Image: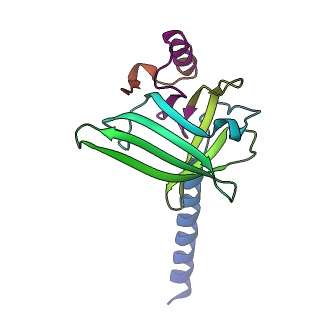
Amino acid sequence: MHMKTRSFYKTVAKRAVSALCMLLGSCIGIPENIKPVENFVLEKYLGRWYEIARLDHSFERGLSKVSADYSLLDDGSVKVINRGYSEKGNKWKEAKGKAYFVKSPDIGHLKVSFFGPFYGAYVIFELDHKNYQYSLVCGPDRSYLWILARTQKIDNELKSILIAKAKALGFETDKLIFVDH
């Protein structure tokens, strides 16, 4: 192979690897002006959470009775089991994954993977620090938003407060899907 051709392919390969790293890195980023909660205590967050509302995405489309279970694994990572019922398919769907803290275990910013080496951001930006009964969670951009709670329903006042907070931060709350349980 000619030296110029070899050099060209090396340059292209380096740029492709760099672009892939940037792309994958942005998947665990935090949307602008969103701040993950501090003084986060994983042990209090573990257990079952119910999805109260979400922005639509293909991986949850048409699902009701959606829940997420978080448990600690021996290596310090978090086992994630997301579950929802598909009326159309008349069956339960389940996704299993693993989550790791991005920086520090006292900051509510994790990266979660359901598909091998590919990670997505899990950013807890609002949390009931006292009792760990509700949270607002987003992904790497504002197209991902979840309102989670320890119970299948929350009172309307709390729901309004959480929606207002998300709206003030730029989320399209008028597009929220409220989950049937």
Q: Give the extent of the magenta segment.
A: 137-165
Residue 159 horizontal/vertical position (percent): 51, 16
Instruction: Work out whether residue 35 or residue 146 is closer to the camera in this orientation and state it.
Output: 146
Instruction: Work out whether residue 17 or residue 139 is closer to the camera in this orientation and state it.
Output: 139
Image point (50%, 81%), residue name: 5
Q: Is residue 106 left or right of residue 5?
A: right
Image point (60%, 52%), residue name: 25
**From where the camera sits, is residue 23 visible?**
no
Q: Is residue 108 left or right of residue 27?
A: right
Instruction: Work out whether residue 163 or residue 74 is closer to the camera in this orientation and state it.
Output: 74
Residue 63 horizontal/vertical position (percent): 34, 36
Image point (42%, 43%), residue name: 83
> Would residue 164 be counted in the magenta stretch?
yes
> Would residue 99 be counted in the magenta stretch?
no
**From where the camera sits, is residue 13 visible?**
yes
Residue 58: quadrant of the picture: top left
Eyeballing the image, is 127 above or below 69? above
Eyeballing the image, is 33 above or below 74? above
Q: Quadrant of the C terminus?
A: top left
Residue 85: quadrant of the picture: top left
Number of numbered discs present? 0
Residue 129 horizontal/vertical position (percent): 70, 25
Image point (38%, 40%), residue name: 84
Residue 10: quadrant of the picture: bottom right
Residue 92 horizontal/vertical position (percent): 33, 44
Residue at the bottom extreme?
1
Instruction: Work out whether residue 38 or residue 180 is closer to the camera in this orientation and state it.
Output: 180
